[in-house]
Image (cartoon, rainbow, N blue to C red):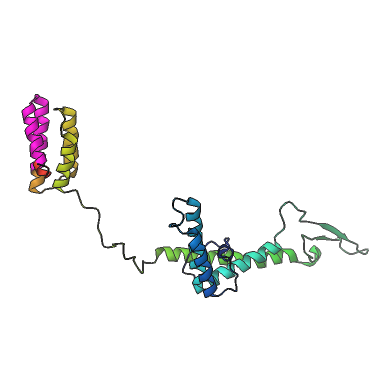
Amino acid sequence: MARIPFDPATDYYQLLGVTPESSDEEIIAAYRRLAKAYHPDLNAGSAVAAGRMARVNVAKSVLLDHDTRATYDQLRAVQRAYARVAPMPGTETVTVRYAPHQVGQRPRHRIVPNVVRRSTAHGFDRGTGIMLLVAVPLIAALAIYVFQAVQLSIQPLREAPGDVNLSAGPPARPTAHGTADAVFVMVHAQPPSRELAIRAYNFTMARADSTPESELLRADVRRMLSSAGAGDAEGWDAAVADICQLAGRC
């Protein structure tokens, strides 16, 4: 069973510059040559190099996984067989021929789309049979590929990179210290303003928790709001000074 999703229409052998008969060692050597040419460290800021490097990485993964490579090779063989049988676009695909017949016999017409067919007077069309012989395996192979891709997408993650913490929960709420620091930066050296006080109040209420420090911060912001409404500059400055202390700046 293929373990790595792939695009059956992509020629991964051509991407790496190898052949279907190439060994794992030859594939690895080809990959290393291309990696040196397209590596991000050597092509900083190049979107083209980054895209090519991504395709090279996929090609290496597909061809070095034996199960995936076997499935990929089977799909390529089916596609090549279908391409040999399918008519070329824009060409004459149907030829009607009349076969002479003797008196008393049924006239026979042959419809020959690029291959020799049996007479329609004698049963099933050979060309249709050939198309079915090619189309049915192709559809089955594509169905297998889709099924394997779905299975791969829903299977649990087997290994986690060392720099990824899967046990981490949702982001923690900002601390009272951090919220106080953000509020102080917002109101520092600003004259009393009801609009500014409302903005600081809403910011604090959305982030503060139930700790004693958060309760103090909420009280200071309410003092700012009332001082701004009363035009009390001293009360405003005192509240800002207390917020500065909670933020650790004073």
Q: Quadrant of the C terminus?
A: top left
> Left of 220 or right of it: where is 3?
right
The answer to whether residue 73 is left or right of residue 119 is: left
Would you say 106 lies left or right of 199 here?
right
Q: Residue furthest right?
A: 103
**What is the residue that sits farthest to the top in this orientation?**
231
In this picture, is 166 found above or below 241? below
Residue 194: percent from left, percent from top? 16, 28
Q: Nearer the viewer, residue 117 or 36?
A: 36
Rendered residue at 85%/58% (across/down):
97
Residue 170 lies in quadrant: bottom left
The answer to whether 130 is drawn above or below residue 247 in the figure is below
The span picked out in magenta is 216-244
Residue 188 in view, yes or no: yes
Estimate the x, y position of residue 184 in percent, counting from the top left: 15, 38
Residue lying at 70% horizontally and 64% vertically, measured from the top left: 84
Query: Can residue 205 be seen in this snapshot?
Result: no
Nearest the viewer among 187 and 207 is: 187
